[in-house]
Image (cartoon, rainbow, N blue to C red):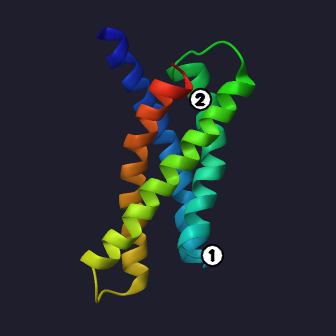
Amino acid sequence: MKKINSTFIKFAIVGVVNTIVGMSIMFISYNVLHLGYWLSSFLNFSLASILSFFLNKNITFQSKGNTGTKAIRFALNIAICYVIAYGIAKPFTMFVLKGQPVKIQENIAMLIGLGIFSILNYFGQKLIVFK
């Protein structure tokens, strides 16, 4: 139980760093550069995922072994979690906030997507990538 708590705490700390980096990328891309919902959220996860892989491999899960295989599993996990999380978040938010400006709907959808993604990603990394 102590190992699980320690792993989760490390994952949460790495997640905070990743979230700050990723959200900065995502919201600047969307609100300042006007790159759109999908491209902005994709840039967030593609760039922040590189940082996440190395931090989680070396700090959170202290995983040894074939980095190439783990990187492939990590990339697949990130891709699957991304599609599920943001694919659910946008239509859900657009439905719930119907009538609100699209900018508000999509910013909130990105936050909801981030929450869903974080939960799915933790279990994917723990159970599949760095098992």
Examine the image and state in which quarter residue 96 appears.
bottom left
10 Å neighbourhood of mark 2: few (<14), some, or many (≥20)? some
Q: Is residue 82 above or below residue 120?
A: below
Q: Amino acid at mark 1?
A: Leu
Residue linked to disc 2: 55
Could you tell me which quadrant the N terminus lies in? top left
Along the line of sight, the residue nearer the viewer: 67 or 106 = 67
Along the line of sight, the residue nearer the viewer: 95 or 18 = 95
Q: Of the residues under marks 2 and 1, which one precedes in the sequence?
A: 1
Relative horizontal placement of residue 51, taking residue 125 as reference (left or right): right
Residue 5 place in picture, x, y as percent: 32, 18
Instruction: Tell me the number on the disc at residue 35.
Output: 1
Q: Residue at x 45, y 63 (%)?
A: 87
Q: Amino acid at mark 2?
A: Leu
Cα separation, mark 2 vs mark 1, equals 28 Å
Examine the image and state in which quarter residue 29 appears.
bottom right
Residue 65 place in picture, x, y as percent: 68, 13
Relative horizontal placement of residue 99, taking residue 45 as reference (left or right): left
Relative horizontal placement of residue 81, taking residue 79 as reference (left or right): left
10 Å neighbourhood of mark 1: few (<14), some, or many (≥20)? some
User: Quick one: SS at disc 2?
Assistant: helix
Residue 100 place in picture, x, y as percent: 31, 86
Q: Is residue 130 above or below residue 28?
A: above
Along the line of sight, the residue nearer the viewer: 85 or 105 = 85
User: Quick one: SS at disc 1?
Assistant: loop
Instruction: Tell me the number on the disc at residue 68.
Output: none
Residue 2 place in picture, x, y as percent: 31, 10
Examine the image and state in which quarter residue 102 appears.
bottom left
Q: Is residue 50 above or below residue 127?
A: below
- Asked whether disc 2 touches disc 1, contact meaning CB atoms under 8 Å apart, the reply is no
